[in-house]
Every structure is written in structure tokens, then in C-alpha cells.
Image: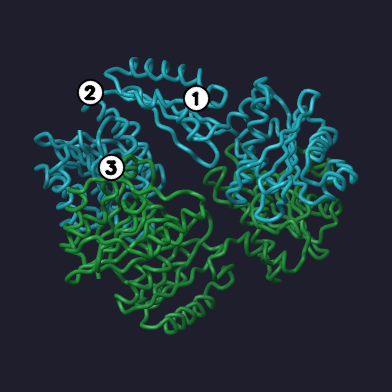
Chain colours: A cyan, B green
Amino acid sequence: MRATIVSVGTELLFGQIVNTNAAYLSQQLNLLGIDVLYHYTVGDNPGRLGELILHGFEECDLIITTGGLGPTQDDLTKEIVCDVLQDHLILHAPTIEYLESYFARLGRVMTDNNRKQALVPSRSTVFKNEGGTAPGFALENEGKVAICLPGPPREMTRMFEGKVKPFLEKLTNHVIHYRMLRLFGIGESQLETDLIDLIDQQTDPTLATYAKEGECSLRVASKRSSLEEAKAAVESTIETVKQRVGDHIYSSDNEELHEVVAKKLIQREIRFASAESCTGGLFAQTMTEVPGISAVFDRGFVTYSNRSKTEELGVSEETLARFGAVSRETALEMAEGLHRVTGCPLCIAVTGIAGPEGGTEDKPVGRVYISCYYDGISLCREETIRNVSRSWNRNFAKLLMLDTINKLLDGKEIE
Amino acid sequence: MRATIVSVGTELLFGQIVNTNAAYLSQQLNLLGIDVLYHYTVGDNPGRLGELILHGFEECDLIITTGGLGPTQDDLTKEIVCDVLQDHLILHAPTIEYLESYFARLGRVMTDNNRKQALVPSRSTVFKNEGGTAPGFALENEGKVAICLPGPPREMTRMFEGKVKPFLEKLTNHVIHYRMLRLFGIGESQLETDLIDLIDQQTDPTLATYAKEGECSLRVASKRSSLEEAKAAVESTIETVKQRVGDHIYSSDNEELHEVVAKKLIQREIRFASAESCTGGLFAQTMTEVPGISAVFDRGFVTYSNRSKTEELGVSEETLARFGAVSRETALEMAEGLHRVTGCPLCIAVTGIAGPEGGTEDKPVGRVYISCYYDGISLCREETIRNVSRSWNRNFAKLLMLDTINKLLDGKEIE
């Protein structure tokens, strides 16, 4: 099956918003085994939109549109699709009811132009909009299918996941299942090398690697005739992947590293504290993104000046003078001092050179020392981060802190 | 003038990357007074690419392509554009020289397929790629212009700014100048209301408002026959805007609020410290993104637990028990304690309810107290942030902290 994605909206042609819908839909259609041949973007112009839809149907069986389903005069997608696929619009009673209750809940009166949103092609399969007002729909004619979805990404993705994906699975007689593994401590090219035979031979399940700011993801996807089969195929491939690179996998469910770590700390009721120099509070900020973390996060220090390292954590002036603020010795005294001050069973500290200035031959920009006190033992990791930029270095240092805690909690060795 | 933007690349059709190039180019072309009618995305398929370019030229005078200029077999944009605009490729000697020196500098041997990148249409204006290898170019034929640019956004935007914009300014006999104002403490709709007569009457300069996570931007752009004229027109409009909403403008050069505040603190050599509860280190993290901040940032505390507020900042247990951790009284004791502990002349503190849980009728989610000690005086601001999400509330609280410092440094009143 071949598809064209048509995005409707003048705001896209003004560059006011970036078209993330086309990328999302492309990923999803490719997973379903549907080839995407074109993305088109067009403004609220009925003639141009109609022509592009006709052009798309010359080579494709499926056209997915986003946008132009709203209540205003500009919103003309439905009329055009009806013209092309020879249908007409009717008032959809369940949508009217839904819209009335929607506006009542907000305490607002439904204006007349909102009734326009309840118009759908008479032969269409209607997709209720759980996150907004305008419904979506699918319309077929002589082997050609148009699926029209709302423009706002939150509404569109929710409708796709819940309604359109099952519709397309039925249409293609396939069910898709996939899992996203997350890895740390391995580069994308090394990951590819380690799995190259699996990637080269892949028919189903398929493997796809992604890189993002120091981390890697691996998508394992299977397209089968039943969900059970697809799930079994994915699980079996994941087992093989785990045998190769299992040490680097921290989530099999697309969770972020800090979410994984926070969950473990909350579940095991381990109180913790942090002392940061080069990351400047990034670790504390990231951990406190997680609701409920206050049950175990006691406090954090951003000891940026040398004086604050001494006053707050008791790092000795001699250590600072002899080894420098960026050193194994200072990092260890930070973590141990943090434990002394807070009494927390888990204390993590970092000091390093974030750049762009401040590097030396011995200690280049990107050098970090991560020290962790846990269970009566303190350790220190020296790492040299590939110096990409100040923000990259800081983010990578934060990931190293999280990775250190994660490994300690799992009883794994720190290299 | 009318334009079509054509993005070439299979990775776009797989959804592996989001098409930010089309949005960037649309913004730039609109500023130049060029209407964008279509965005097309197509894979590395010569037939389809050629057809789309022909289709674009039916209605448009200008086509800008991105991608497909690289050294591999798939990269066919140049050949197609030559076919359509009746030219042929020749080896461009300056590009060969540049490529040879480029690879020599990297200590790599230039492979043969890289020479392919030095092929350009014989009649074209060549744009050197300062950030990569493949050059861009512009080719005209019978009033139709094709501009071909490399796909990587960093290379493309640099080439556009430095080479393509002047080329288009010459082509359209216009020069564009714009400035981006940044505002805080005013919503986008209020901003529009305050400037509605200017926006409604606008011919040149044009005004465009943007909203982003609690902040607003206003672009003032002018298209004239000379840069001096354009600059004068922009400055004069900005003066009028300042008379209306000047209190809310924190930058006329598109700087972020934390950059503005950091610059002032560094310039005036004002040492500062922070104590955060609900923002969990976000303030410290944001300030320490700025290189050179270590000269004035002494330390930060993330006093998440009540015990840490007492132990680190000396907030009295009685205050916590009587007024609660989220209260004006606690915030003031945090800032004053912070000054006592650190001796810094500027001390900022925040406590609040980030959500999603923890709100009460009296103190709903989004309630924050921001206290600042500066120049011997401490003040406290109570604000109730519109509760969008935990991360929104935290980010907005951080902006309120920055806004408080910015106003104090400017001697402005805090409402």
C-alpha cells in the first residue's frame, strides 16, 4: 500500500509552526508496512488542495490529511474530499451530542459554526475526537481511501493511536506491535555493529536504531496477522538483543533514565541527596520533574564556588588547593560530606569542566568526576565526555550520574 | 513572487527526522515578501522529483530545494534541476580546491565520489558551503529560478543567511531588516489587543506575535529598497511599541530572560545565590547554562524537604508548622537565611506547589511565593500560575524568579 500525507494550514506555509504531524504519520505508516511517497503542505485553498489530493491518488491508495476540519470558513478539507471520493456531507448525530456536552462541561454556549464540525461524509467511518472537538473520518471509494484528521498534534496522535491504527490494521490485514529499548553507554554505530547481522537479515521483526543526546534507542517492531504473533516475535528478538547488549539497556518500555532511577528510589524508599558543580542543578532539576519524588529526595546543593564546597560539604581547603576543584579527591569529599550533612543513604556528587573555557592538557573540557556514596561505600568514576558543547557536556554528565546510581541499585559493576 | 519549497530525502518520508527546513525557509521567504504556496517532500526518486518541480513552476517563479546534493548515487537534485531549466553540469574549480583543502584539514583523503559535489549547472550562481562540503546554487531560466541548498539544517541556514538572502534581496529589489522583541508578564492575546491598531493597519513594517511557554515575542520587520530605510522604519515602530508595552519588554535582540539577567549580574559583579523548592534546581541550572557565570554565582540550594529548609537556611520550624512550607513567611525566611549563610548581596528563593498533587482550596496547584533579598531589603511576590502541567508550572516559576531579579536590577517596581 502507498500513501501521501497532506498537511493543510496557512500557518505551516508561513513557517509559524513546524510540521511534526507528517513525521509522526510517516513513522506510523512505515511500521504498518505502508510506503509513504509524498508529503504535501498547502494553505486553506480549495482548488490547490483538491488538485494535490487528485495527484496523490494517481500513485497512492491512501491519503491522510491533517488540519482544516475546524469550525471556521477556512476549513474546507471535508468538502474537497467528498468531491474527490463522490460523497456528500451529513450531520452526524453522535457528534452533535458530544459537542453539546463538551461545551456544557466548559460552561460555554455552542456557537452555530461549531455545528459545522459535526458534518461528515455520509459513507464515512467517523473517529471521535477524545481530546478536542472536530471528529476525524475515513472515506473509501473504488479502492481509494482518504483519512482526515484534526491538525493539533495532541488531538491527531491520540486519534491515530486509538482509532486510525486499528482501522489501518484491519485494512492491511496486519497488526503491528513494537517496543522501544533505551540504552546508555553505547554509541549508535557500536550498537549497529553489535547487531549488524540481525539488522542486515531483518525481514520481521525489524530493528531501527536512533541516537539522541548521548543516548541510543532501538525499536523492535513486528507486523503479523495477529497481535499474539507480533508480540511473540518482538519478545524473541529482544531476548537475542539482550544477550548482545543487555548491559547497556536501562528500559524496554521507552522510559527515560531519570524515570527509571526515580522509580527504583521511590519503590525502595531510598532517601537521596545531590551535590553538583559543573551540572549546576541539572541533576536535581531532572529528578524533581518526577511527581512524588519528594518522598525520597531530601535536598540538593549546587556548590559552584570553592568556598561553598568547603562551607556546605566540608571539602578541605587543602584538597581543593592540592588536587583542584575538578578532581577525584574533591568529588569523593563532596559525596562523603553530603552524606555527613544530610544523613541520606545515597549521596551523589559531580565536579567537572563543562566548557567552553577552563580545560587544560591534563584535564580537558569534558572531564568529569562522579562520586557516589551508597551503603557505606563511596566510589568515584572519572570520565572524559566528547566535548560537543557546554550544554551537551552538562547533559552527558547528568546521564553519567543517573547511570552510576542505576548500576549501583542493580548491583552492577561500575567500570 | 511565489515560491514552492521542495524537501528531498527518504529519511523525511520514513519520519526519521522532522522537516524544520521548510518552516525556516517559509519564515524567511515571507519576510522577503515572497508567498509560499506549497511544501513538497519527496524521496530520492528522480521521476517524482522532476514532476514536482514542474508542478511547482506552473504557479510559482521560485523553487527552493533542500537535500540531495551529497556525494552518493542517490543525490540527484542537480541533474533534475538542470533538465527542467535546460542547463548541464560542469566541474566547478573553486569547489574542487575547497573540497581538497577541507579533507586535507581533516587529515582524510578525498574519495572520488566527493568530486561529484563540485558539479554545478554551467550558468548557475554558486553558494559556497561554509559549514560542510556540498555547495548550493541558484539557476535561472526564462523567469523561473531554482535555488538548491544542502539538507543538513546547520549548513542550510548558514548558507541562506550569508548567501541566499542577499541573492533574493537583489532579485526582489528589497532588503529585509527585522528585530525580535521578547516580553514577559503579558499574554499573546493582551499583546495583540494593545497593538491591534498597529497590527491591523500594518503594511510596512509588519508586526507578528509569537507565544512560547509563558513568554511572548514580537517580530518587527521591514522590507525596503535600502537597509538604512528598513532599519529606520523598524526602529521607529519599536519606539511606538515601547510606549505601549515597554514595561514588559526585556530584550530587543531576541535574548532569553536568563541571558539578560546573567549579563547584568556579571557586568555589575553582583554575587548571588538561590534556594529552590518547587523548581527543584531549574533556576540554578538555567543560570549556569551561561558561560562565565561562575564569576558571580556562588551556590544554590534545592531545599526539597522541610528539614533541609531548616538545616540549610534556618527557616524556623514554627514558621513551617504555622504557615506551611508554601507560604510568604517561609519564602522570606528562605531568602533571608540564604543571605545569612552565603553573604551574597542578592539572594532569591522560591517555594510553591508544582503539582499535579498537593493543591488545596486556599493554595491551589500553581501557587508560588518568590522572595528576593537585595540591597538590604527583602520582598516577596505571591503569584498563582495558570496550572497547565507540572513542567509548565516549574518553568513559569523560574521565569518569575528571573523577572523579579531583572526588575530589581532595573530599579523597577514589583507589582
Residue A218 or residue A103, whichever sits in front = A218
Residue B2 showing in the rendered view = no
Mark 3: give few (<14), some (14-19) or many (20+) Cα within 10 Å: many
Q: Along the polypeptide, which appears first: circle 1 or circle 3?
A: 3
Left or right: B203 in relation to A378: left
**Dot 3 corresponds to which residue?**
A149
Distance from the alpha carbon under mark 2 to that under mark 3: 22 Å
Residue type highlighted by circle 1: Ser
Left or right: A269 in relation to A78: right
x, y percent for residue A7: 28, 49
Q: Secondary structure at mark 3?
A: strand
x, y percent for residue A89: 15, 44
Residue A53 or residue B317, whichever sits in front = A53
Residue B45 or residue B252, whichever sits in front = B45
Residue type highlighted by circle 2: Asn
**Dot 1 corresponds to which residue?**
A252
Distance from the alpha carbon under mark 1 to that under mark 2: 27 Å
x, y percent for residue B90: 26, 62
Protein chain holding label 3:
A
Nearer mark to the viewer, of 2 and 3: 2
Q: Is residue B256 above or below residue A107?
A: below
Left or right: A38 in relation to B15: left
**Dot 2 corresponds to which residue?**
A173
Q: Along the polypeptide, which appears first: circle 1 or circle 2?
A: 2
Mark 2: give few (<14), some (14-19) or many (20+) Cα within 10 Å: few
Q: Secondary structure at mark 1?
A: loop
Task: Please identify the quarter of the rendering in which residue A207 is found.
Answer: top left
Residue at 36% x, 68% y: name it: B164
